[in-house]
Amino acid sequence: MTNKVNIYNKINSFNKKIYISGDKSISIRSVLLASQAIGESRIYNILESEDVLNALKTIKKLGINYKKIKNCYRIKGYGLNGFNTKKKISINAGNSGTLARLILGLLINSKNEVTIVGDKSLSKRDFSRVTEPLKIFGANISSNKKKLPVKIFGSKFLRPIKYTETLGSAQCKSAVMLAALKTPGITKIKAKKSRNHTEIFFKNLKIPIKVLSKKDYDYIEITGENNFKGFDYTVPGDISSSSFFIVLTLLSQKSQLTLKNINTNNSRIGIIKILNKMNANIKLTNKKKYKGELISDLIVKSKRELKSINCPSSLNSSAIDEFLILFLVAAKARGVSTFRDLGELNKKESPRLDIAINFLRKIGIRVIRFKNNIKIYGNPKLNLKGEYDMKNFRKDHRVFMMSCIAALTLGGNWKIHDKDSINTSFPTFIELIKKIGARVN
């Protein structure tokens, strides 16, 4: 079977309603926390992507059993000391930085050495941002020049720490929070604003946590060594996956799309705030709180005239996974859009900032870069006629999906390689764009 798609036609006008797969960040967190609970947890609508399936394989390798019955994963935990690490084992996190970093936090008290490995892409990413604070807890950790493989041997004599997270990384913050679960005393964290799913989950599970939210930082205190019971949870739809369909609708002609039951946590909707500043009209309806998370339906309509943006860097952390598709909107907007402080993009599955700039230039858009800041000179009349062959993007799932949306909205004849990359985060992506009316082969 070929591992590429061909797109030769723009998508026709549509008016559809769709459901998006479960949120990846929350799916992984729900699996890991269920592994630490006492008793059975029942989790519904888990995203069945490679990253999440690797999380399930990981907990099973650590002695936690689960079974799937229809749309429900049942995970039986044995508490904060429930992992069975009687011998040295190796865990393959695949492409998932979330899994690799968060599981290190839970292995802070492992009884034997555990080695974390990953695929070629993950093995190039920096892990010192997680391993350094975990060492302060008392764990024995070694790495390959700050990268994978990472070996961790837990300690019986853990001590709480004071930690300042300055990167706006929810992965780093969450790894420390999970380590704090297993540590006696109070761990104190000062964290630059980032996704707060872990904090919300802790509160929902009645884990002792205090959060004081200030303008730029959150101050978090966690009292460790408090077991919690198994739980029921339904994972909401993923806003990052939704972003491709939001932009598909915005850049199409006379179209409307309703996306049902999407996680619209304020720390995740940077893309909606940015697009609405660019003259989009994305409405959140049927809002409801579910176990601390805000869930909404999104109504998106196509827009003839989008305007440029001087994007506040304060929105970066809440849109970090969506900038690739946002750059596509900037390419079609009127005026010059400016984005700043995007160095974290090059520390994702691929050097996304570099790839995005090359992509935009490839489709005829002028881009000026200064360090980690870029200016995109939009062209509202952008209409592609040529042939485009997208490959060598390190199998980054978001680059693949962004390329598909460009083909369906801007025109041209496209060959887009590494279709299987979407299995990392959004296996049903092709199926859904076909459902809306895209011709993809």
Image: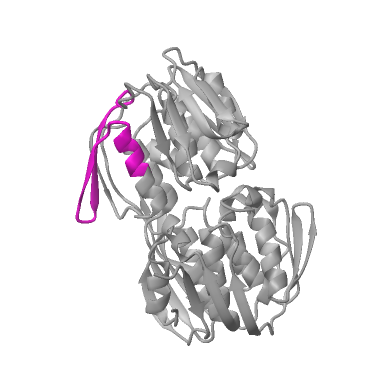
x%, y% of residue 73? 25, 48
Between 406 and 267, the one lying in front of the other is: 406
x%, y% of residue 130? 56, 32
**What are the residue bounds of the magenta stretch?**
55-82
Between 175 and 147, the one lying in front of the other is: 147
Q: Is residue 293 visible?
A: no
Q: Is residue 235 visible?
A: yes
Given the current orientation, which residue lies at the most extreme front position?
1
Asked where in the image residue 366 lies, by quadrant, the reply is bottom right
- Residue 61 on the magenta span: yes
The residue depicted at 56 percent of the width and 70 percent of the height is 403
x%, y% of residue 127? 57, 35
x%, y% of residue 42? 24, 45
Q: Is residue 310 left or right of residue 222?
A: right
Between 184 and 354, the one lying in front of the other is: 354
- Residue 68 on the magenta span: yes
